[in-house]
Image (tube, rainbow, N blue to C red):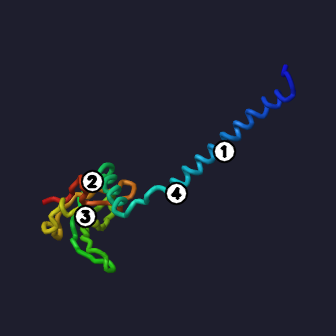
Amino acid sequence: MFESRASLLGHLIQPMFSFRLYTLLAGGVGAVLAAYLMFGRKKKTAAEIERERRDWLTQAGRITDGTVIDVQEITPNGHHAATMLIFQYDVGGVSYEASQDVTHLRQWINLHSCRLGLPTSVRYDPQNPGNSMVVSEKWMGLRQ
């Protein structure tokens, strides 16, 4: 069979050593990957999250009729002024009143034409109808 006991021992130890080395390396790679996912990625800003929400609603949202209630400029606690478009719509017999910050979307809309009672189309999430919008970079619900 084997020439000596040393040879037999070498055949038994070699696979065990390779498996331990592989396990150690795989664990190290997993730890590095976990550390990158936790600390290495840049957190999304509120503006990026809002843009992704608008993009998702543009692609997957349903459309219903609504009405513009008001356009207001607010300045929360000394921060930059925000322009809020306030609108109302109905889904499945339930009335919703919502607002959308359109400060960064001004180039797509004419705020002076947004008056009380202006008809609009509203895109909403069918799973969560309170998640809605009237305007995005790729879609316009305001009717002139």
What residue sits 39% from the left and 55% below the top? 127
Q: Tell me: residue 72, above or below residue 55.
A: below
What residue sits 43% from the left and 58% below the top? 42
> Which quadrant of the figure has residue 133?
bottom left
Pointers 1 and 4 in contact (C-beta within 8 Å): no
Of the numbered discs 4 and 2, the one sitting upstream in the chain is 4
**92 sits to left or right of 138:** right
Quarter of the picture containing the C terminus is bottom left
Residue at image mark 4: 38
CA separation in Å, label 2 and label 3: 22 Å
Total numbered badges shown on the rendered structure: 4
What residue sits 37% from the left and 64% below the top? 46
**Front label number (4 vs 2):** 4
Of the numbered discs 2 and 1, the one sitting upstream in the chain is 1
Secondary structure type for disc 2 = strand
Secondary structure type for disc 1 = helix
**Residue type pointed to by label 1:** Leu
Of the numbered discs 1 and 4, the one sitting upstream in the chain is 1
Mark 2, residues whose alpha carbon is within 10 Å: few (<14), some, or many (≥20)?
some
Pointers 2 and 1 in contact (C-beta within 8 Å): no
**Residue type pointed to by label 4:** Met
Residue at image mark 1: 24
Residue 63 is marked as 2
**Residue type pointed to by label 2:** Ile
Residue at image mark 3: 104
